[in-house]
Image: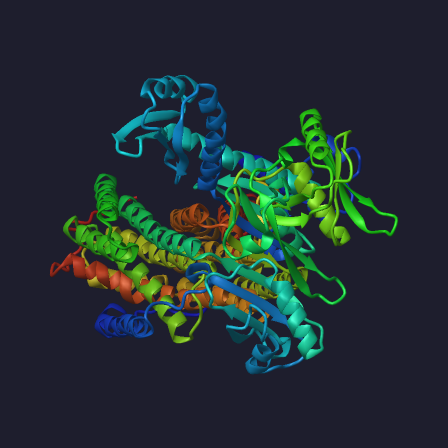
Amino acid sequence: MEIFKTQLNLDFVGKRYIAFAISGICILATVVLLVVRGGPNYGVDFAGGVVVQVKLEKKHSPAEIRDALKGTELEDTIIQEFGEKTAFEYLIRVTNPDIRAAGLGDKAQQALSAKLGEKVDIRQVEMVGPQVGEELRKKALYAIFYAMLMMAVYISGRFEQKWLMSAIMAGSLIAAASFAAIVGVGVLWLIFIALGVSIALCWFMKLKYAMGAIVSLMHDVFVVIGAFALTDREVSLSTVAALLTIVGYSLNDNIVVFDRIRENLGRLRKRPFVEIINVSINETLSRTILTGTTTMIVLVVLLVFGGPVIHDFAFGLFVGIITGTYSSIFVASPILLLSEGKTLQAGKNSKPQG
Amino acid sequence: MKSLSWRAGISAALIVIAFVFLVPSVTQELPAWWSGVLPKDKIHLGLDLQGGVHLILEVEVKKAVESYLERVVEDLKPDLRKSKIRVLDLKRRGIDGIEITLAPDQEAKDLETLLGTNYPSFKLETGVRDEKGKAYFLSLLEQERTQIYKMAADQALETIRNRVDQFGVTEPDIRPQAGYRILIQLPGVKDPKRAIDLIGKTARLEFKLVDEENSLEDALKGNVPAGSEILQETAVDRKTGRKTTVPYLLKKRSALTGESITDARVELERMGEPYVSLSFDSRGARVFERITGDNVGKRLAIVLDDKVYSAPVIRDKISGGKAQITGAFSMDDAKDLAIVLRAGALPAPVKILEERTVGPSLGKDSIDQGFTSMVIGLSIILILVAIYYRLSGIIADVVLLLNIPFILGGLALFGATLTLPGIAGVILSIAMSVDANVLIYERIREELRLGKPARAAMEAGFARAFVTIFDSNLTTVIAGLVLLQFGTGPVRGFAVTLIIGLVSNVLTAVFMARIVFDYLYVIKRWKTISI
């Protein structure tokens, strides 16, 4: 069985301006959403606070549960349904930052079972102090930043044999980052500055593969964060794990196409660069679709059967695989063209390697 | 093809090793001969899968410095008296040191000699002489302060370990972290609140005499006499749940502290009420005998963490170094009190920075759901691959399945923890392992389309795809390593499974699948590839 019986020759690169427009809109929408909501919807991991997850025997409205908790420390709370409707699970979120978690589960259980008259199962209690939340947030941002940086370095070294230059880039970036940290710039800005600087560095050093990779990775991270904002999901530690995995997966996709471009640069020396990119995308297309599909099937299974705990994680990965696949075709590869400038003739400054 | 048998041998050996590491996790009881040389560690399940408590505590080390300085102030008093140095004021200033005000007519030299020789942890700073007297400041050296911080954190860790051991948790994980923090993981704890209370209690036990010369009423109005303090006893009526508090006026200075305790155990009264009986060391026993002897008819309060447990009247001199703490205890309360008294007090209070408790029911559901997803997802993939690539697809399925023992065996080998995101990691890395097969097979198809014969197409397919597979897996491993650095608990578990999965992925898809292909198309010389 084959998806494409004959070798396709679709003009992906020709559609790049449409693709750039779509991507631009997605990223803009993310930024607008985040600005309007005043930042991502941080979960207890990053915002700090207490969440008690309870399982009841039948359906109750949040108001009923709040009533039942009157007179306990859990009075001032936000109640949410959690997971499937038939599971009757609820999250009790405590907004008071000074509350102590120890014993809160027991208190919730006593109050609820006394007032509602049914079996109450305390599934999970999570408490993160404000200080730890802040630290975790910082660590998460650094992790995403370093992951992208290391991959950019690896790609420029591997694809353009410019280990020295990529090392210089990494060195100057880390220096810039630590300088900014000393001056006291917030981590978020630090990351934006660093990524901006690294794109500029890639541009001037003509590290086009690294640039394509960084831009498409940023694109993917943005889109996933946007999807979380749009569906009002919480950003938690596992979201960050999902983001880093997506960064890895998306790069994996980029590399397959990049590898083919590099190979075709040697094989089809006379052809214009734009055509080589197109041919390479087409040649790897059935693999791209096949792998994307199998991964997505697995994630859909996780979304349906994996349970509420892992739901957001699977959702993040699911969106990430879609945008990762899209970005390797419509973002990363066309960017190679941009940095190539007007000289569409291949083989001048990019000798095939490997 | 001599190398083929070598490669097949290596593969078989690896598979056997993977299964050997898996055996302890799947069997209930290992045969006796097994445990001698073969691995016996099971795969650890994360707290999110088996339920339990995760805590991050911060040892409030500054409090340890405060109490150290308070002790030095107490020690200084008799020293100054002995050296006949008159001081007007002597008090602690924060965590910086001790302020001393020398009487105006007092010679400064004596003080300087005394402090210079007996208190090497301090630097003496001379202040100004005003009408009240000459001010001195005994400043605690920075390195001493750091030393106290460190010792407090170390001792807190040790004490908590002791308490948890005596509480009886299987496989607790207690380790120090940067910033005087302690990470505690207690898998499978049934009563999280009790465990957390037990761990977090400072457990500073003091015996204090009740101040009977001054009136409690006066003190409650705000006239607390110097050298005394008001502490409360909270009694809970266990039938009605009503709380009552009783205030006491106590001498500030403790007559005896928990440091002198050698043993504490739960015993039962005739009525079946539990109480905690204490044994003192010889010094403690002497002190206790003297105090009780000197204060017959007065009341002695037993104070734990500034809360009065009881304040019985001393009827007689008590010798023999035994005492009892009674109160309206439940059996668990009494047991826990005995544990904390045996394990000793924390050198400084601890603050809970992070607490996550997973109930056993959620953990069980997570395991069920995780494995259901794994089985369903995997089955769909295997069927798809077999349909899509026919015989080659079935070969791919076999090597895909090999990933499972490799990943799980790898988890057991490295003593890693399987978490719920980790199960997702297993599924995901198998899905990504499909990618390696797809890359190879699509390449082989391309080569076949170019008209190459079976063997050449197969060889070119493997060779060309390898570079890509290696690159793409390596970059995801990089992401995994960053995750490993960053994450804790479940996220770390995900990173570990992902990394192991990717390595096993390259091993199975490139190295092991190739053996089968080499056998079919090189040794058996098949002419067509079913792909």
Along the viewing direction, whichever of B294 and A309 lies nearer the viewer: B294
Examine the rendered structure and indicate whether residue A64 appears above or below residue B478.
below
Residue A296 rendering spot, x and y as whole percentages: 48, 67
Residue A324 rendering spot, x and y as whole percentages: 37, 64
Residue A222 rendering spot, x and y as whole percentages: 33, 65
Quadrant holding the C terminus of chain A: top left
The quarter of the picture where residue B386 lies is bottom right
Examine the rendered structure and indicate whether residue B60 appears above or below residue B68.
below
The quarter of the picture where residue A97 lies is bottom left
Examine the rendered structure and indicate whether residue A182 appears above or below residue A308.
above
Callout count: 0
Examine the rendered structure and indicate whether residue A206 appears above or below residue A302.
above
Colouring: rainbow
Along the viewing direction, whichever of B9 and A267 lies nearer the viewer: B9
- Position of B264 with respect to B112 (left or right) is right
Along the viewing direction, whichever of A204 and A124 lies nearer the viewer: A124
Q: Is residue B50 visible?
A: no
- Position of B259 with respect to A167 (left or right) is right
Residue at position x 31%, y 31% in the image: B133
- Position of B444 with respect to B188 (left or right) is left
Q: Is residue B31 visible?
A: yes
Residue at position x 55%, y 44% in the image: B228
Given the current orientation, which residue lies at the most extreme left position? Answer: A342
- Position of A151 with respect to B241 (left or right) is left
Residue at position x 38%, y 69% in the image: A6
Residue A323 rendering spot, x and y as whole percentages: 37, 67
